[in-house]
Amino acid sequence: MVNCPKCDAAIDVDEEDLDEGDILSCDECGAALTVGSVNPVELELEGDKDEDEDEDDFDEDDDEDEEEEEGEEEEWH
């Protein structure tokens, strides 16, 4: 038995049959959930995973832009 990270409802699953990356849904709130880890079992909201990846991509792009600007400044000196 695990709890939904959105509404905290109990979700009846056989924890031994879960694999990382499995997708479940909460019967109470209907949230799509991904198994983030199996020992201990941790569930993540399906949308949260994508948002974290987008933020990482955005941060990397910002760092690259700053490095390019710094390099351009050095050339002008």
Image (cartoon, helix red, strand yellow):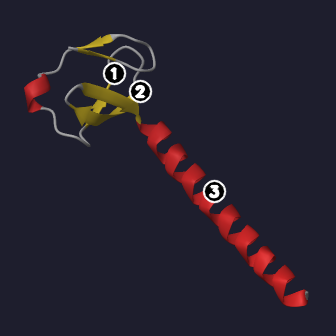
User: For the view shown, which residue lies furthest in the top direction?
Assistant: 9
* SS state under label 2: loop
The residue under label 3 is: 59
The answer to whether 5 appears left or right of 61 in the picture is: left
The residue under label 1 is: 26
The residue under label 2 is: 31
| Cα–Cα gap, marks 3 and 1 | 32 Å
Given residues 29 and 73, the one toward you in this image is 73
Q: Quadrant of the C terminus?
A: bottom right
Disc 3 + disc 2, Cβ < 8 Å: no
Q: Earlier in the sequence, mark 3 or mark 1?
A: 1
Given residues 10 and 62, the one toward you in this image is 62
Q: Quadrant of the N terminus?
A: top left
Q: Percent position (x, y) of residue 60?
A: 60, 62
User: For the view shown, which residue lies furthest in the front direction?
Assistant: 77
Q: Percent position (x, y) of residue 20?
A: 22, 40
- Residue in the image at 66% along x and 70% along y: 64
Categorize mark 3 by other alpha carbons within 10 Å: few (<14), some (14-19), many (20+). few
Residue 35 in the image: above or below residue 56: above
* SS state under label 3: helix
The answer to whether 68 appears left or right of 10 in the picture is: right
